[in-house]
Image (cartoon, helix red, strand yellow):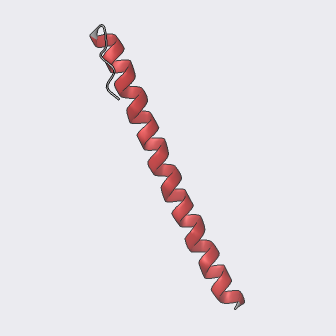
Amino acid sequence: MVVLPKNIKEFNQIYMEKKFFNVVLKNTVLQMDAVVAIVRVKYRIKK
């Protein structure tokens, strides 16, 4: 979905919000991967 901004200020705000959201999303995915890896290692040690 493309939002057409009325001016540059609005465009920058939308762009920054999307950028911030993408960074948060990436960090969340990385954290999930790390947690999964740790759980796997612990599970292997228990086994």
Tell me which corner region of the image, top left, top right, bottom left or bottom right, holds residue 11.
Answer: top left
Looking at the image, which residue is at 48% across and 58% down?
30
Residue 21 horizontal/vertical position (percent): 46, 36
Looking at the image, which residue is at 55% across and 73% down?
37
Q: Is residue 2 above or below residue 29?
A: above
Of residues 15 and 38, which is closer to you in this image? 15
- Residue furthest right as drawn: 46
Residue 46 horizontal/vertical position (percent): 72, 88
Quadrant placement of the N terminus? top left
- Residue furthest front as drawn: 1
Tell me which corner region of the image, top left, top right, bottom left or bottom right, holds residue 5.
Answer: top left
Of residues 3 and 34, which is closer to you in this image? 3
Q: Is residue 32 above or below residue 20?
A: below
Q: Is residue 38 above or below residue 2?
A: below
- Residue furthest bottom as drawn: 47
Residue 3 horizontal/vertical position (percent): 34, 20
Residue 20 horizontal/vertical position (percent): 43, 34
Would you say 8 lies left or right of 34 here?
A: left
Would you say 46 lies left or right of 17 here?
A: right
Tell me which corner region of the image, top left, top right, bottom left or bottom right, holds residue 47.
Answer: bottom right
